[in-house]
Image: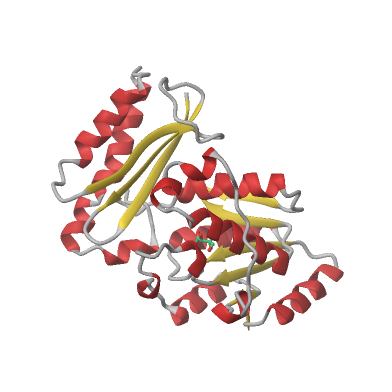
Amino acid sequence: MKIIHSVEALRQAVKTEKKVGKSVGFVPTMGFLHEGHMSLVKAAKKDNDFVVASIFVNPTQFGENEDLDAYPKDLEGDQNKLEQEGVDILFYPTVEEMYPKGYSTYVSVEGDMTGVLCGSSRPGHFRGVATIVTKLFNMVAPDRAYFGQKDAQQVSVIERMVKDLNMDLEIIPCPIHREADGLAMSSRNTYLNEKERKDALVLSQSLFEAKETILSGERRANKIIEGIIDKISTVDYAIIDYVEIVDALTLHKIDEIKGDILIAIAVKVGKPRLIDNLRLEV
Ligand code: PAF
């Protein structure tokens, strides 16, 4: 695996492979890789001749009160994992390489899609994501890019952006990866202490129970939301950011559970704010 730090070297390396007709898969990450990330890499390896992964903790997607500097890092561990999985290039740029002095251009997906769920509690977050993902797509020029469904809103925003800006690549959403006990894998889980790790299970459990309730016939979104809130509230120190049921494609709130729906939750369990979701066709 080649480790590349500069945009110019990355472009040259990918161009060489494309010239001989190889398809390019791309997995953008912020590092501290877990099995969820590796499932994206595996999918990219399966579908493409050549795979590029990136590690870049993107400052523009962090809010002022979010601790960018404390974002967990393990470059050596990440390198080993990517190498073992057969990644061809790891792109690991500096902040200066990605946002040089005088940088002034941002990509913003407007409207409801970025104003709800994480968009309302993390203003500017999706502008940062759309900007960095556009830049990375321009640098790597992949045929396919892989994103985890745990960040369901991120996937929807990126799909919208790719469509709206006529970007020439396919977005491949990959299923949420869960620990054996159901907790959705996340780099942020590392902040949980032993008790919080146990208590954090209320997120996935509340979603699984909601699914059962829907499958047994409940169609009122407010009833399902109440059930999720009740379950999460059994952990007295958990702070709910949102519990929403939306149309999976438009992310508009719905009252009646019907069609392709997304139940999305964000909850602070101790220090970390965790997100989880469940997509269901009813
Ligand atoms: O999902 C992430 O890790 C990040 O939001 C992404 C897509 C790598 C952009 O920084």
**Quadrant of residue 9 within the rendered picture:** bottom right
Residue drawn 81% across and 75% down? 16
| Residue 58 place in picture, x, y as percent | 51, 68
Pick the front one: 43 or 112? 112
Residue drawn 70% across and 60% down? 48
**Quadrant of residue 189 within the rendered picture:** bottom left
Q: In the rendered image of this protein, does residue 78 appear above or below residue 180?
A: below
Q: In the rendered image of this protein, does residue 240 appear above or below residue 70?
A: above
| Residue 237 place in picture, x, y as percent | 15, 51
Left or right: residue 251 compared with residue 202: right
Left or right: residue 111 compared with residue 74: right
Pick the front one: 188 or 57? 57
**Quadrant of residue 220 within the rendered picture:** top left
| Residue 125 place in picture, x, y as percent | 48, 56
Residue drawn 51% across and 78% down? 79
Left or right: residue 165 compared with residue 246: right
Which quarter shows the N terminus? bottom right
In this view of the protein, can residue 45 be seen by the observer? no
The coloring applied to the image is: secondary structure
Q: How many marks?
A: 0
